[in-house]
Amino acid sequence: MILMFAKRPDRAGKVSQALKLAAESVAQGRPGEAVRICRKVLADFPNDAKVHYALGVALGHAGQIDPAIDQLRQAIRLKPDLFEAHTNLGVLLGRRGKPDEAMAAFSEAVRLRPDVAELQMNLSNALREGWMLDQAMAAAEKAIALKPSLPEAQLCLGAAAACMGRFDRAIDAYRNAIRLRPDFAAAHLNLALAELVTGNFERGWPEYEWRRQCAGVLPGRQFAQAAWKGKPLDGKTILLHAEQGFGDAIHFIRYAPLVAGMGGKVVVECPPALVRLFDNFPGVGRIVTTGQPLPGFDYQCPLSSLPGVFRTTLATIPATIPYLAADAEIADSWRKRMGKSGELLHAGLAWSGSADNRNDRNRSIALERFSPLSGVEGVRFHSLQIAAPPAGGGIVLSDWSANLKDFAETAGLIENLDLVISVDTAVAHLAGAMGKTVWLLVPFPPDWRWLLDRADSPWYPTMRLFRQEMPGDWDGVIRRVAVELSGYKSDHG
């Protein structure tokens, strides 16, 4: 979705010239200048819908989302058939996390201009965000019918199909998009995720490398040193760097000993929260905190690229567990702090991940929805979140947030637990890497690494998956967890 200026000329020459100047300013990366131009002309033409529209677009590009929404709504009040205003209003409402209002705006734009494929795409994306998936598919198909040469429409169709769990259909759509535009990075990345989640690792890993060319997916980073492709290192130094979230780094650090086995001297760069956890990791000669000066090195490779470098298949996943362990002194300090009693089952709970994750609204769960677990007797729950639990969460928790300064501390706490129950976040990866019993709560559709239609994970042998049967159905998942927890307590009491 893009903010766009109306192209039709205004009757008043002054307004027309102002709109042209404003559009040029935005195009040249000077939205503040466009805002000033629009406000100046608006003083003379306060009831001109197109000036309000232009001001809304300029404010949107300047990052002033709420004032931009107000201006676009004013433009619509003055000229209800200005479809561009409805379109841009939908874009900004989507950014504000208001999918229902965005859908309404895009629906009106489509009603006014049903023959514009791009508007059908916008509507499809908004419908998908609102989990109205059948309608999202229909709008994407209409966009394709209107403009078969539009690769973004195929991407839109694939995204809707993937959300429905129809990955064969999604793969076909992404491939169609790539045929139309061979360098379409977003289509390659989405194809990778669809191939990987269906277990087609051989086809998925090469496509996964396109993630680094997708705007908004990863921060751009350039190295003078060559990317390592798997050749023997013969004593050369290689930098393995964490490029995604904490969970991805924990997941893929398992490959570091394999890299060392190729004859390399391994340096790992990672965020501060992981430094102590990764200290003395097998095969790693040095840990560098992200942002600190790097030592000299000959090759570099993102941690997330290592499965592809080693051509990992389902049969060759390096799943020797544990590959991470808590520091003994830290674990002992947690044992004393917790005051463990052998009569209770100690279960850790993680209900939300980073809000920066693009899929966070689907994977995180409101704490109060875990209240059925409180009915299981003989279980003491421990929060594994770095933020204090919200009041009135519906379940009694020991809050350790003030003590969880980094993942080394979290590992020390997990070492003293009998069970970890977690949404799809870094805590689950850490517990799985430590060989702890983990119950992972998996959204529909799942992240690629959890595959489809299985209750176990080849990446973490001690992990059990509790999957949503339909999007948003966390209550059904929690009920199943509560039943299993009661039996688990009886077996381990």
Image (spheres, grey):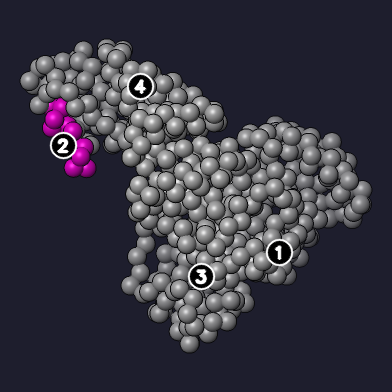
Kindly state the secondary structure of the residue where label 4 is placed: loop
Kindly state the secondary structure of the residue where label 2 is placed: helix
Residue assigned mark 1: 434
Q: Earlier in the sequence, mark 1 or mark 2?
A: 2
Q: How far apart are marks 2 and 4 (CA)?
A: 28 Å
Residue 388 visible, this angle: no
**Magenta region:** 18-29
Q: Comparing marks 3 and 4, which lies closer to the viewer?
A: 4
Q: Earlier in the sequence, mark 4 or mark 1?
A: 4
Amino acid type at circle 2 is Glu
Q: Does the magenta stretch include residue 27?
A: yes
Amino acid type at circle 1 is Met
Q: Earlier in the sequence, mark 1 or mark 3?
A: 3
Q: How far apart are marks 4 and 1 (CA)?
A: 55 Å
> Residue at (17%, 32%) from the top-left corner?
22
Q: Earlier in the sequence, mark 2 or mark 4?
A: 2
Quarter of the N terminus within the rendering: top left
Compared to residue 490, the image places residue 336 above or below, namely below
Judge from the rendering whether residue 134 lies leftward or rightward of residue 212; answer left or right: right
Give the number of the disc on residue 309. 3
| Disc 3 and disc 2 in contact, CB within 8 angstroms | no
Residue 42 visible, this angle: yes
Neighbourhood count class around disc 4 (C-alpha, 10 Å): few under 14, some 14–19, many 20 upward: some
Q: Which of marks 3 and 2 is nearer the N terminus?
A: 2
Residue assigned mark 4: 114
Judge from the rendering whether residue 451 lies leftward or rightward of residue 10; answer left or right: right
| Disc 1 and disc 2 in contact, CB within 8 angstroms | no
Q: Which of 32 and 437 is in front in this view?
A: 437
| Disc 2 and disc 4 in contact, CB within 8 angstroms | no
